[in-house]
Image (spheres, helix red, strand yellow):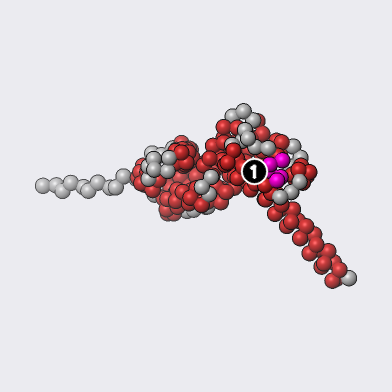
Amino acid sequence: MAKTRGAAADGRASTTELGAARRRDLLEAAYSLIAEKGLEGLRTRDIAARAGVNISTLHYYFGTKDALLVAIVEHVTDKFGKERAPGPAGPADALAGLRAHLESAWRSFQDNPHLATVLQELSLRARRDPAARMAFRAVHKEWNLAVEHLVRQGVRGGQLRSDLDPRAAAAVVTSFIIGAMIQLGVDAGAFDFQHVSEEVDRWLAPAPAKRARSRT
């Protein structure tokens, strides 16, 4: 009996894993098609064909067009989010954490050459589509709050400028990353990301202490 139960559990796990893999395949197919044709040229039958399944399978995993679009937004931002979101850090680690955050964001776009193009396509769609807009709002809110927390910790610990507004500074950092990726997606030689991120780093860091003038 125990063996039968174990086999059943293994069967359920395999079914779940297969479903998750098939769902990922469909989202990856959508991702590559958006990169090639843009959202306006995206067709569900093409997504199914690219993933090697029939159209009914796609409808099984994504019942409506809105559900599919939200899932695509989450899938694409997850590609960015794995490198994007800074982890918890103490005050002493805040500046290093922000530096690592900028570097990891750069790596995520290097590892996914079509990411900037697809994100831009989805962002433009979100202006007109309520479902995509809500999905992006949640992503941006979470991202900005994570960076804001890091900035706040750095200000308190003296690692960052004492006059920084943490919320505004977080918006500057996240907007820089998004804007940089859009520009570099169009022209890879527009500027050196590392050099510009160092300027952001200098802006965030406190000014070096001035040497006290010696008294005569």
Question: Which stretch appears magenta?
Answer: 45-49
Q: Secondary structure at mark 1?
A: helix
- Percent position (x, y) of residue 84? 52, 48
Q: How would you rate the neighbour count of disc 1 (Cα within 10 Å): few for under 14, some for 14-19, many for 20 or more?
A: many
Residue 145: in sight, yes or no?
no
Point 68% across, 43% down: residue = 47
Would you place residue 183 above or below residue 104 in this image? Answer: above
SS assignment for the magenta stretch, majority: helix
Amino acid type, callout 1: Ala
- Percent position (x, y) of residue 134? 63, 35
Left or right position of 139 against 92? right
Quadrant of the rendered image containing residue 14: bottom right
- Percent position (x, y) of residue 58? 74, 44
Point 78% across, 43% down: residue = 56
Point 67% across, 50% down: residue = 25
The residue indicated by pointer 1 is 30
In the rendered image, the residue lying farthest to the right is 1
